[in-house]
Image (tube, grey):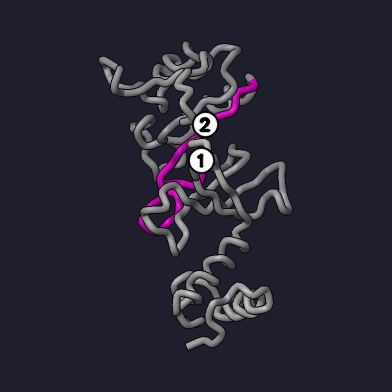
């Protein structure tokens, strides 16, 4: 992204575009063995993107179907490898299929767009930890991140605490003319939270209008 197109020698991408016989099914022993061939001591992280495409024989709502893939993941972990599984959420916003897949996972991360997201903002996300084994407190708090380009034409991830992100959104919407009730509805937060942030912003001199509608 910063002009250096060199691909690290440890980075190995197995893509369906280059497979004559399609991608291996990771829910089968045969499919796992095909991938194991590429996993040597130099590999620390295996990214499976995504479960539905790379383990198509799994019935998402059947917990027993997950067992074969789960056993493989545990084997990789016992060999010192980290495994990142990418999965899609359903229409209700929660993960599709059985929650059995979470049993062996150390961390479950849920990504969502902010309520005031605009397409022009590109990769702007809220990151929430739904399971956090091994870390807690401030490290487990949700946050917002956005991929931005700096003055050197380099892409960098900018992060901020979710509370601060919401505070800034309240300021922008209030200065844009919305009432506190409209802001609460727009951001899906409590009216009391909006009132608290407006009061804080007024004290800090960040409001361009002083009265609510």
Percent across and percent down for residue 119 are 36, 54
Q: Is residue 212 above or below residue 150?
A: below
- Residue at 51%, 13% (x, y): give it: 9
- Residue at 34%, 32% (x, y): give it: 57
Q: Which residue is mark 2?
A: 70
Percent across and percent down for residue 126 are 52, 54
Percent across and percent down for residue 169 are 52, 67
- Residue at 52%, 86% (x, y): give it: 212
Q: Secondary structure at mark 1?
A: helix
Q: Secondary structure at mark 2?
A: helix
Q: Which residues are magenta?
A: 80-101
Classify 10 Å Cα crowding around label 2: few (below 14), some (14-19), many (20 and above): some
* Circle on res. 56: none
Q: Residue furthest right?
A: 137
> Which of 25 and 42 lies nearest the eye of the viewer?
42
**Would you identify the image quadrant in which residue 171 lies?**
bottom right
Q: Sequence-wise, which precedes: disc 1 or disc 2?
A: 2
Question: Are discs 1 and 2 less than 8 Å apart at CB?
Answer: yes
Q: Residue furthest left?
A: 20
**Would you identify the image quadrant in which residue 193 lies?**
bottom right
Image-based side of 133 in relation to 108, left or right: right
Within the magenta stretch, is there residue 86?
yes
Q: Which residue is mark 1?
A: 101
- What is the total number of numbered labels drawn onto the structure image? 2
Q: Is residue 140 above or below residue 37?
A: below
Spatial CA distance of label 1 from label 2 is 7 Å
Image-based side of 140 in relation to 14, left or right: right
User: Most prominent secondary structure in the magenta stretch?
Assistant: loop
Classify 10 Å Cα crowding around label 1: few (below 14), some (14-19), many (20 and above): some
- Residue at 59%, 28% (x, y): give it: 82
Within the magenta stretch, is there residue 13?
no
Q: Is residue 32 above or below residue 96?
A: above
């Amino acid at each position: 992204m910063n002009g250096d197109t060199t691909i690290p020698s440890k980075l190995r991408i197995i893509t369906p575009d280059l497979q004559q016989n399609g991608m291996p099914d990771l829910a089968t022993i045969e499919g796992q063995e095909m991938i194991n061939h590429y996993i040597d001591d130099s590999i620390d992280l295996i990214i499976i993107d995504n479960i539905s495409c790379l383990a198509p024989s799994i019935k998402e709502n059947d917990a027993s179907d997950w067992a074969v893939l789960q056993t493989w993941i545990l084997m990789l972990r016992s060999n010192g490898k980290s495994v990142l599984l990418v999965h899609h959420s359903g229409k209700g916003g929660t993960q599709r299929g059985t929650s059995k897949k979470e049993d062996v996972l150390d961390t479950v991360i849920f990504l969502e767009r902010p309520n005031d997201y605009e397409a022009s903002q590109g990769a702007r996300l809220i990151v929430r930890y739904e399971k956090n084994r091994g870390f807690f407190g401030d490290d487990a708090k949700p946050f917002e991140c956005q991929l931005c380009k700096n003055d050197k034409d380099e892409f960098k991830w900018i992060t901020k605490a979710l509370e601060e992100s919401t505070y800034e959104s309240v300021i922008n919407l209030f200065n844009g003319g919305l009432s506190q009730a409209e802001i609460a509805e727009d951001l899906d937060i409590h009216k009391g939270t909006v009132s608290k942030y407006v009061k804080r912003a007024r004290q800090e001199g960040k409001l361009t209008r002083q009265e609510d509608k």
